[in-house]
Amino acid sequence: MAPQISYQQYVPLNLSATNTDLENYTLVTAQDYEVYIQNILDKSNSKIAFGGYNEVRNLYKRSTVFKNQATDERNIHIGVDLWINEQATIHAALDGTIHSFQNNTALGDYGPTIILQHQIDGFTFHTLYGHLSLETLHNLTVGAAVTAGQMIGTLGLPPINGDYAPHLHFQIIIDMQNKTGDYPGVASKESINYYLENCPDPNYLLNIQS
């Protein structure tokens, strides 16, 4: 995201349920989170806040996407989030093709989403880019080639992006399990072992060091 911003301008962000600092703020709406995150960026003189892999979070409680009577509660994040309070550009992490795309419109979901497919030495895997703008989905074609660093869209703003403070959800997925345009980005404690294996830490690829 926004490749003109160096990793030296990134700051770690902890949104876990164990972060007691969050108790000092009213964090309900997208705007609440925008203010909180911007405060962290300003204090550290940074441009992008990042983190969240394998992080247990309370922020999903407002959405039925993550909890209903038939399923276990999902509250463990299995991607990396890159938070910036502007409509930044989004770029392909690697050479690949467009696997699928979709607007996931439920409250708390991804909003507009692109999934790319990659092959390295015969090994196939995928990268998911969630919380994008509606314009990003225009004129896309499944199977179209993309190159590493190619701009594939722009960041979405609330409420289009699932009604979150602006951020990119970036996730590695090995087995798509026949899903298209969508894949779980949050797991339950009952399923987390599978998802941590199928969705390894994206920072192995991004190599963010801040």
Image (spheres, grey):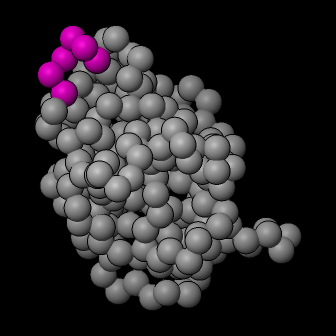
> Which residues fall within the magenta stretch?
22-27
Please tell me whether residue 73 is drawn above or below residue 139 in the rendered image: above
Please tell me whether residue 123 is drawn above or below residue 10 in the rendered image: below
Residue 68 located left or right of residue 143: left
User: Where does the image place residue 71, in percent across and percent down from the top left?
Assistant: 38, 52
Q: Quadrant of residue 148?
A: bottom right
The answer to whether residue 94 shows anywhere in this view is no
Residue sitting at 28 percent across and 62 percent down?
Answer: 111
Task: Work out whether residue 50 or residue 177 is closer to the camera in this orientation and state it.
Answer: 177
| Screen quadrant of the C terminus | top right
Please tell me whether residue 176 is drawn above or below residue 194 in the rendered image: below
Task: Work out whether residue 124 or residue 155 is closer to the camera in this orientation and state it.
Answer: 124
Task: Work out whether residue 9 or residue 12 is closer to the camera in this orientation and state it.
Answer: 12
The answer to whether residue 143 shows anywhere in this view is yes
Residue sitting at 79 percent across and 69 percent down?
Answer: 123
The count of marks equals 0
User: Where does the image place residue 202, in percent across and percent down from the top left?
Assistant: 61, 47
Task: Work out whether residue 1 or residue 55 is closer to the camera in this orientation and state it.
Answer: 55
